[in-house]
Amino acid sequence: MQEIENCSPPWLKQLLKAKFYVDCQVHKQYRCNQCNRYCIECTGNLFRTHYLDDHKNHHVIQIRRSSLSNAVGVDDIEKHMNVCDVQTYSINKRLIVFLNSRPYTGFPYGVTNVCNICRRSLPAGNFKFCCLS
């Protein structure tokens, strides 16, 4: 596990710990005020779409929600790190990877490919991990 942490980008740890889709405390009056953006240059800085101009020359990742779990588009994250070993999912015709592992119940019968970290079952193929964490 230590080996994996040493090769990951420095901003990844903060991204994985961040709490997305919380209401923006500055703009409580707006209907869509949830923080779903992450700025790699301003590590740890979560913000809502309203603040995109403040980060116009930065690398910003949009966080998406699927099955109540946070995910990121493969096309967004692969600019900053290699995700070819992480299981992808197609949501609204867009490939995503989950940020953190999701709950699951045991192993289906006959599973041969599992996540190297949490042992979650993976589809047949070359995937080694179920999520970025």
Image (cartoon, rainbow, N blue to C red):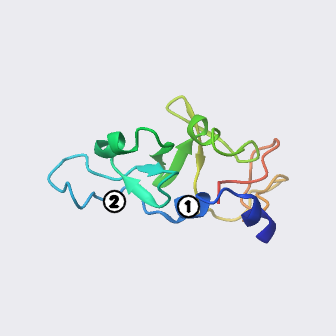
Relative height, residue 91 to residue 71 (above, below)? above
What x and y, as percent, mark residue 82?
A: 72, 44
Q: Amino acid at mark 2?
A: Val
Q: Where is the N terminus found, in terms of image quarters? A: bottom right
Find disc 1 in the rendering and name its residue.
16
Residue nearest the observer in this picture, 94 or 63:
63
| Nearer-N-terminus badge (2/1) | 1
Which residue is located at x 75 percent, y 45 percent? 123
Residue nearest the observer in this picture, 114 or 47:
47
Kindly report the distance in space between the C-alpha atoms of the residues bearing marks 2 and 1. Answer: 15 Å
What kind of element bears circle 1? helix
The disc at residue 22 is 2
Label 2: how many Cα within 10 Å (few below 14, some 14–19, many 20+) = few
What x and y, as percent, mark residue 89?
A: 61, 40
Q: Where is the C terminus found, in terms of image quarters? A: bottom right
Which residue is located at x 73 percent, y 54 percent? 129
Q: Is residue 90 left or right of residue 58?
A: right
Q: Looking at the image, which residue sits at the far bottom?
A: 2
Residue nearest the observer in this picture, 80 or 84:
80
Q: Amino acid at mark 1?
A: Leu
What x and y, as percent, mark residue 90?
A: 58, 35
What kind of element bears circle 2? loop
The disc at residue 66 is none
What x and y, as percent, mark residue 58?
A: 48, 43
Q: Looking at the image, which residue sits at the far left?
A: 29
Q: Is residue 17 left or right of residue 52?
A: right
Label 1: how many Cα within 10 Å (few below 14, some 14–19, many 20+) = some
Question: Can residue 110 be seen in this snapshot?
Answer: yes
Q: How many marks?
A: 2
Which residue is located at x 24 percent, y 61 percent? 25
